[in-house]
Image (cartoon, helix red, strand yellow):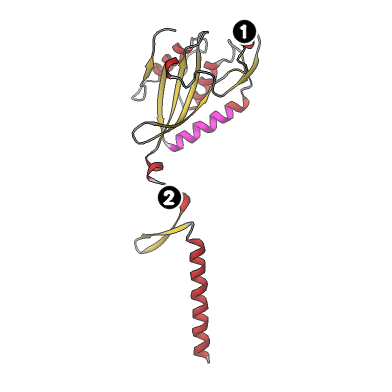
Amino acid sequence: MTLMSGRLLLVVSLALALAACQSRGATESSVSNGGAAVAVTSATVKSPQQRAARYYIEFRSRYALSYGHTYVIFGRLDKSGKVVDREVAGLHPASNSAVPYVLGHYIPVPAETGESDGDLDDRYRSASWRVTLSEAEYNKVVAYIRKLQAKSRFWQATIYNCNAFVGEIARSMGYETPGIWLRPQQYVTKLREMNGGPNAIGYTGPAG
């Protein structure tokens, strides 16, 4: 009787253990590590595409009917360096009308901090400087951009303009920045030249 009870208890224990493994199997796997089983969750296992991806931020200026615009583009690159996704951040008056733009040379006017017309069109690019980043560096930069976007509510041409906005991002990364009263093309070109190094690769087009 005791032997039968022991066998029954063993069968029940094995069944419970098997059920637990099956319920966990959808999110965990085991990797051998010197004979010891190490649990690896699916969240920590990256696909080959994720492992190969790099990140970047590009300081950029574009031509416009006025003296231009300065902004950043940031996102992910594949292993060949091709852009996988991208997002724009830049400070500009919150209107397509020229009236807030003109007023903004005298008083602060409401601003937006996202993409504006022509930002992603390479035909309008007047200067650029792209810097590649690790995932940790990229996450830190993006977190700073989000905070800066949340607090930047006004644009004023001589006090807080698009150059000033981009300059804050650059300084958060440890870069030196030129004065904010340069034309956007000059600003981005000077930013690239001031910070030198192997990553100081970019583009400068003809004067707008």
Report how many numbered discs are placed on residues in the image.
Answer: 2
- From the image, tell me which residue sits under label 1: 102
- The magenta segment is 135-148
Evaluate whether residue 170 shows in this view: no
- From the image, tell me which residue sits under label 2: 45
What residue is shown at x 42% (from left), y 16% (from top)? 123
Q: Nearer the viewer, residue 7 or 160?
A: 7
Q: Which type of secondary structure does the marked residue at label 2 adopt?
A: loop
Label 1 neighbour load within 10 Å: few <14, some 14-19, many 20+: some
Please say if 45 is above or below 75. Answer: below
How far apart are labels 1 and 2 at the CA level? 53 Å
What residue is shown at x 52% (from left), y 81% (from top)? 9
Earlier residue among tags 1 and 2: 2
Evaluate whether residue 150 shows in this view: yes
Examine the structure image and report whether residue 121 is included in the region drawn in magenta: no
The image shows residue 23 at horizontal and vertical percentages of: 52, 63
